Amino acid sequence: MLFLPLILRNKNRRYTDTVAEGRLLPNFKEAFQIAATFALVVLGWIFFRAESMGNAVAYFAGMMDKSLFSIGLLYNKKRVLESTVFIMVMLVIEWIGRKNQFGLEKLGLKWKRSPRYVLYFGISILIIAYAFPEEATEFIYFQF
């Protein structure tokens, strides 16, 4: 019985509470767990994009190249900065409304699901259209 995964033993619901319950910010452990989960998910996506394990490893190695941390590689620094600020504002809104069904509910926007999704979709399209170059780029799932 010990060897069965937690989900099969119905013991996978230990951490379902709101992060930083009753506090403005998470503690160090919670912030680390949030960042670690995000990093693992993003790094895991590389395996879906890579054509082979060798390419995935090469991509990971390229991520550690010091030239990638240079601001000079960005397409349009002003647009990237503005988009980053906007994304940070949206993250703050979501953080403030983390107990609610959706983040904007705390701001008094108690819209039904359909108009809310249209708003989220519209904001996403605006960010993408504003932040990225106008040249055509290769579709990420072209190989599937």
Image (cartoon, rainbow, N blue to C red):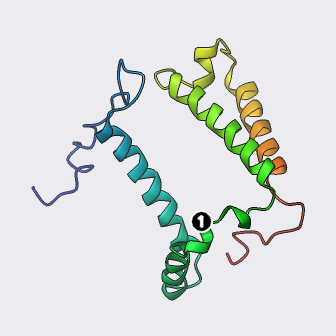
The x and y percentages for residue 83 are 73, 44
Lateral position of residue 121 relative to residue 52, left or right:
right
- Which quarter of the image is occupied by the C terminus? bottom right
Give the residue displayed 80% in from the left and 48% down from the top: 79
Mark 1 packing: few (<14 Cα in 10 Å), some, or many (20+)?
few
Up-down relation of residue 122 to residue 116 (above or below): below
Q: Nearer the viewer, residue 88 or 1?
A: 88
Residue that appears at 18% across and 57% down: 4
- Judging by the rendered image, the residue that carries numbered circle 1 is 69
**Residue most extreme to the left:** 1
Report the number of discs. 1
Q: Secondary structure at mark 1?
A: helix
Asked whether, in this view, residue 106 is left or right of residue 14, the answer is right
Quadrant (top left, top right, bottom left, bottom right) of the N terminus:
bottom left
- State left or right for residue 35 relative to residue 58: left
Image position of 32 (left or right of 118)? left
Q: Residue furthest bottom?
A: 54
Q: Is residue 114 above or below residue 38?
A: above
Quadrant of the rendered image containing residue 103: top right
Near-viewer residue (129 or 117):
129
**Type of amino acid at the residue the image marks with label 1:** Phe
| Residue 52 sits in quarter | bottom right
Where in the figure is residue 128, as x and y percent of width and height? 78, 50
User: 60 above or below 17?
Assistant: below
Question: Relative to 8, does residue 98 appear above or below in the rendering?
Answer: above
Q: Residue at x 76, y 25 (%)?
A: 115
